[in-house]
């Protein structure tokens, strides 16, 4: 019979001195997420866990440095796949193969999503989830390191949000932590998971509903940025519900017998006109936008079918539901005006984000320890060139880390973007680490945001971010009281007056065929440009790009 694996706290206790002994004495044994460490008077701010923990964190950072080439290969490989939401087939296959080779157990088809998966290693508590998004942006194909628009495949999708970098960061961090856990025979479980179809608000709420986080103690999420950043409390921005309205009418010859037709496209246009008039009377914090996904077949046929896809964004759950209700009412009214029928389907949802104070403060201490990468003159030249190309003030790359950001009062939140990490943040203590792999002053969701994402800027940012994640994971493995404090904040502050209720209805299912036709169109041409790490050291080398290439 195998002896039980000791917790990291027990390994450290004999070596960390009286301070660690006093701190850990409260929480010897298994972590109870329902504990009340804060109520017992434990301070929120993390305290030093002793020299042994500091040594292990230093070792993890050095191990991350030693994996720079692997990190770079992962970043470049996923950049070259450039897959849209729900079609991240190559990306998921590549990552799961790599993790399986390193001893992780893979559960596939998470929440009924073919590109969803969870990779697990270890046993016991705490359970630490490491995640990041993997999908990309339509029509954002771009050669890396080139400071003007130059697509790899014209019209194809590309990583114009930088989602090719986050999972390489998390994999690198996990391998460094796993190495220490194996050597020290430490208790704890690592779970890696991808943010599928984040740009559609598509994956995480379904993961939550499927119970993917039911046994997780702490979630460390990572998202590309142009600086190190972490925050706690309610965030600036919105939640969202994404709805497609499908109108059905009657076809007829548009010239010979138009009176016999009932135009579904008329209904779509009337709904959009109504919504645009209503905007004046909506709250300043709302954001709403739409695209017509089906406008009919050809002009001489009265459109029997037409559809429009809306994003309804607001800053809290109640107003998201209210905004969506207005949309439903307008759709029904448009159908009545045109004598057509309407149905709808939810295509995604995301709660407003609320991050955990304890996890954020712990993470920020490690950000301060790691610091920003050392940018080369070539890195700065690329950044300055693309900023000038877009008519922005040339500021280059950032050299000072952001401050730790606290809560944003609801009355000061004037809206903005959404991210379905919000649903996870209302399920388990969570933070998002923004890491410095992109260039300041860019528009987002744009080819320009792909310029840096397979260059030394992204490679350095991923290595720095992986150090922060690895060190933070070790903090929570080493100090069970931090896990208790994180759950105390979650239960007694965050969810004291606001409980999580899904924006998804029980019947809503992930629309996993979304973007399939686009990828079928472009993947054959894109496949010719997949990164071949066996032949080339970097994707820049494979594409024959001089770094940087500027006007």
Image: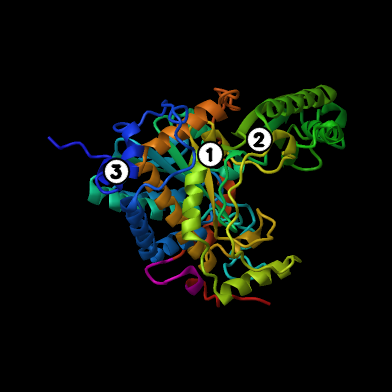
Residue designated by label 2: 240
Return the residue nearer the eye: 245 or 197.
197
Q: CA distance from mark 2 to mark 3?
A: 40 Å
Q: Residues within 10 Å of mark 1 (few under 14, many from 20)?
A: many
Residue at the image point whose x is 40% and y is 52% from the top: 470
- Looking at marks 2 and 3 on the same chain, the residue that comes earlier in the sequence is marked by 3
Q: Residue 5: x and y, percent?
A: 22, 39
Q: Is residue 240 above or below residue 18?
A: above
Name the quadrant containing residue 502: top right
> Residue tagged by mark 3?
8
Q: Nearer the viewer, mark 2 or mark 3?
A: 3
Was residue 162 drawn as part of the magenta stretch in this picture? no
Mark found first going from the N terminus, 3 or 1 = 3
The first of marks 2 and 1 along the sequence is 2
Q: Residues within 10 Å of mark 2 (few under 14, many from 20)?
A: many
Where, quadrant-wise, is the C terminus in this rendering? bottom right
* For residue 215, side relative to residue 411 (left or right): left
Q: Tell me which corner region of the image, top left, top right, bottom left or bottom right, holds residue 259.
A: top right
Magenta-drawn segment? 532-541
Q: Is residue 385 visible?
A: yes
Residue at screen point 29% across, 52% down: 180
Q: Nearer the viewer, mark 2 or mark 1?
A: 1
Q: Quadrant of the N terminus?
A: top left
Q: For the residue labelled by badge 1, is the local secondary structure a helix, a strand or a loop? A: helix
Residue 105 in the image: above or below residue 369: above
Q: Residue 203: image x %, image y %?
A: 53, 38
Q: Residues within 10 Å of mark 3 (few under 14, many from 20)?
A: many
For the residues marked 2 and 1, what is the alpha-carbon distance in whole angstroms? 24 Å
- Taking 20 as reference, is 546 above or below it? below
Instruction: Give the color scheme: rainbow, by chain, secondary structure or one colour.
Output: rainbow
* Residue at position x 38%, y 59% in the image: 61
Mark linked to residue 357 = 1
């Amino acid at each position: 019979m195998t002896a039980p694996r000791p917790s990291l706290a027990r390994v450290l206790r004999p070596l960390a001195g009286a301070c660690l002994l006093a701190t850990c004495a409260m929480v010897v044994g298994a972590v109870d997420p329902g504990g009340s460490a804060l109520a017992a008077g434990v301070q929120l701010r993390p305290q030093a866990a002793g020299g042994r923990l500091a040594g292990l964190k230093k070792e993890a950072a050095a191990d991350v440095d030693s994996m720079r080439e692997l990190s770079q290969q992962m970043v470049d490989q996923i950049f070259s796949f450039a897959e849209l939401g729900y079609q991240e087939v190559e990306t998921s296959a590549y990552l799961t193969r790599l993790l399986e080779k390193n001893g992780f157990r893979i559960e596939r088809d998470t929440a009924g999503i073919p590109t969803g998966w969870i990779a697990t290693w270890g046993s016991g508590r705490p359970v630490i989830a490491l995640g990041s998004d993997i999908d990309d942006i339509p029509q954002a194909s771009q050669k890396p390191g080139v400071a003007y628009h130059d697509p790899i495949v014209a019209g194809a999708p590309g990583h114009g949000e930088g989602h090719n970098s986050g999972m390489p960061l998390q994999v690198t961090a996990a391998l460094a932590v796993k190495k220490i856990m194996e050597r020290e025979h430490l208790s704890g479980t690592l779970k890696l998971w991808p943010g599928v179809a984040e740009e559609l608000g598509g994956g995480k709420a379904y993961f939550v509903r499927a119970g993917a986080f039911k046994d997780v103690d702490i979630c460390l999420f990572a998202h590309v940025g142009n600086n190190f950043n972490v925050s706690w409390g309610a965030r600036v921005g919105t939640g969202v519900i994404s709805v497609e309205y499908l109108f059905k009418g009657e076809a007829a010859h548009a010239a010979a017998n138009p009176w016999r037709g009932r135009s579904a496209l008329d209904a779509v246009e009337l709904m959009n006109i109504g919504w645009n008039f209503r905007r004046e009377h909506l709250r300043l914090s709302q954001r709403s936008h739409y695209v017509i996904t089906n406008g009919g077949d050809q002009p001489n046929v009265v459109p029997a079918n037409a559809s429009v896809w809306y994003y309804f964004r607001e800053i809290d759950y109640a107003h998201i539901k209210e905004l969506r209700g207005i949309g439903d009412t307008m759709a029904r009214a448009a159908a009545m005006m045109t004598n057509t029928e309407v149905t709808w389907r939810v295509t995604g949802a995301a709660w407003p984000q609320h991050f955990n104070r304890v996890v954020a403060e712990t993470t920020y201490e490690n950000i301060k320890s790691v610091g920003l990468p050392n940018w080369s003159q070539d890195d700065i030249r690329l950044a300055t060139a693309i900023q000038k190309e877009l008519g922005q003030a040339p500021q280059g790359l950032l050299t000072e880390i952001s401050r730790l950001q606290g809560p944003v009062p609801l009355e000061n939140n004037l809206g903005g973007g959404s991210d379905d990490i919000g649903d996870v943040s209302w399920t388990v203590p969570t933070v998002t680490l923004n890491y410095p792999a992109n260039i300041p002053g860019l528009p987002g969701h744009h080819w320009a945001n792909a310029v840096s994402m397979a260059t030394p800027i992204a490679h350095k940012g991923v290595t720095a971010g992986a150090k922060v994640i690895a060190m933070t994971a070790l903090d929570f493995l080493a100090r069970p009281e931090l896990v208790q404090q994180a759950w105390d904040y979650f239960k007694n502050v965050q969810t004291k007056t606001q409980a999580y209720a899904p924006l998804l209805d029980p019947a809503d299912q992930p629309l996993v065929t979304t973007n399939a036709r686009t990828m079928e169109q472009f993947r054959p041409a894109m496949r010719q440009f997949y990164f071949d790490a066996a032949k080339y050291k970097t994707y820049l080398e494979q594409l024959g790009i001089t770094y940087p290439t500027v006007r």
